[in-house]
Structure formats: C-alpha cells, structure tokens
Image (cartoon, rainbow, N blue to C red):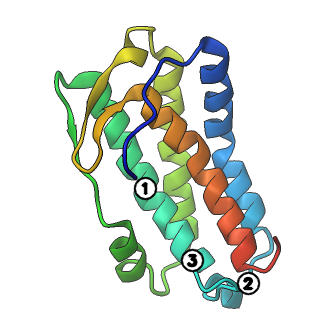
C-alpha cells in the first residue's frame, strides 16, 4: 500500500467509517455462512481461499490493533509492515477458522472502544509506516473500515457467489 490519504475528514465521514469498521465482522461471517470444509480450501478465482482469508483477517486485525494503540500512545510511532502473502501461505494450512474469526471479532471490538474515546487531537495523530511513510489515525480508519468488507467480497468470489 503506497502513500496514505492524508487530509482532514469531517465528523460525518469519520462516523460513517467507524460504523463500517464495526460492521466488518458481520459481513465476513455472512460471506462464510454455510461454508463447507471443502469450500474453505478452494477458490473459484485462483486467489486466496476462504481459509487463508479468515486467517489473514486475524493476522491483519491483530496488527491493526497494535498500530492504533501505538499511534495513540507513542510520541513518534514507527509502524512495521509484514509480509501478508507469506503469513497467509505459511500460517494457514488446515487450521480451523473459528479462532481466527474470534481474534478478528475481539480485536475490532477493543479498537472500537478506543475509537469511541478518541478526541479531535487524537484524530490528528500521525506516525510513520515503514513501507509507506506518513500514517495517521484517520489513515488507519480509512484502511480498516474497508478491509473486512473487501475480504468478504473476496470470500464470496472464491465461493463462486459473486
């Protein structure tokens, strides 16, 4: 991901993105509704399988939970990237998806608690992302508000539903 959005968002846009963020777990569960063990490990599109996506969501959400905390607490946070593809390929195999879905759920819930308590000053905080430079709390929200929805669509396509 190169270069982040920057620019100030208004309170309505922020509220909309927070609602979208909160809705992410639900849309992923909907995309997986009725999935069979066989479907978890195949992709109609040749991309990641639903199992890989579910585990990726846990990895990404746990990473995002640390990122927002570092942004809110550290004076000059340096946020690390990670090799998402390697994580998805190396750490998924045949692991059950339910624990990863729960990790995603609770990472989002704890982050939502933080979002509810952020001040206007908190929304102006920025750190540095090792791969893409300036990275602020608003960038974080824009990215993660869409993240689960994007992957829910990917799950539906992998299952041949979209």
Observer-nearest of 1 and 161: 1
Give whichever of discs 1 and 3 has the lower sequence position.
3
Instruction: List the residue tagged with mark 1.
Output: 60
The residue depicted at 64 percent of the width and 88 percent of the height is 42
Tell me the CA gap for discs 2 and 1: 24 Å
Residue 84, how many percent across, how many down? 38, 66
Q: Is residue 104 left or right of residue 136?
A: right
Helix or strand or loop: what does disc 2 sit on? loop
Helix or strand or loop: what does disc 3 sit on? helix
The residue depicted at 73 percent of the width and 84 percent of the height is 36
Q: Which of pointers 2 and 1 indicates the residue nearer the eye?
A: 1
Q: Residues within 10 Å of mark 2 (few under 14, many from 20)?
A: few
Instruction: List the residue tagged with mark 3.
Output: 51
Q: Is residue 94 above or below residue 121?
A: below
Tell me the CA gap for discs 1 and 3: 14 Å
Observer-nearest of 36 and 126: 126
Q: Is residue 161 left or right of residue 95?
A: right
> Quadrant of the rendered structure where residue 137 is?
top left
Give whichever of discs 2 and 3 has the lower sequence position.
2
């Amino acid at each position: 991901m190169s270069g982040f959005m920057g620019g100030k968002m208004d309170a309505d846009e922020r509220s909309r993105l927070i609602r979208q963020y909160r809705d992410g777990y639900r849309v992923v569960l909907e995309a997986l509704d009725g999935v069979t063990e066989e479907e978890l490990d195949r992709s109609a599109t040749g991309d990641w399988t639903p199992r890989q996506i579910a585990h990726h969501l846990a990895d990404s959400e746990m990473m995002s939970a640390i990122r927002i905390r570092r942004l809110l607490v550290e004076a000059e946070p340096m946020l690390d990237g990670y090799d998402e593809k390697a994580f998805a390929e190396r750490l998924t195999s045949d692991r059950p998806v339910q624990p990863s879905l729960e990790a995603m759920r609770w990472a989002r819930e704890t982050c939502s608690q933080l979002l509810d308590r952020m001040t206007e000053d908190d929304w102006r905080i920025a750190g540095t992302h090792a791969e893409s430079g300036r990275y602020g709390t608003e960038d974080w929200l824009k990215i993660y508000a869409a993240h689960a929805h994007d992957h829910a669509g990917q799950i539906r396509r992998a299952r041949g539903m979209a």
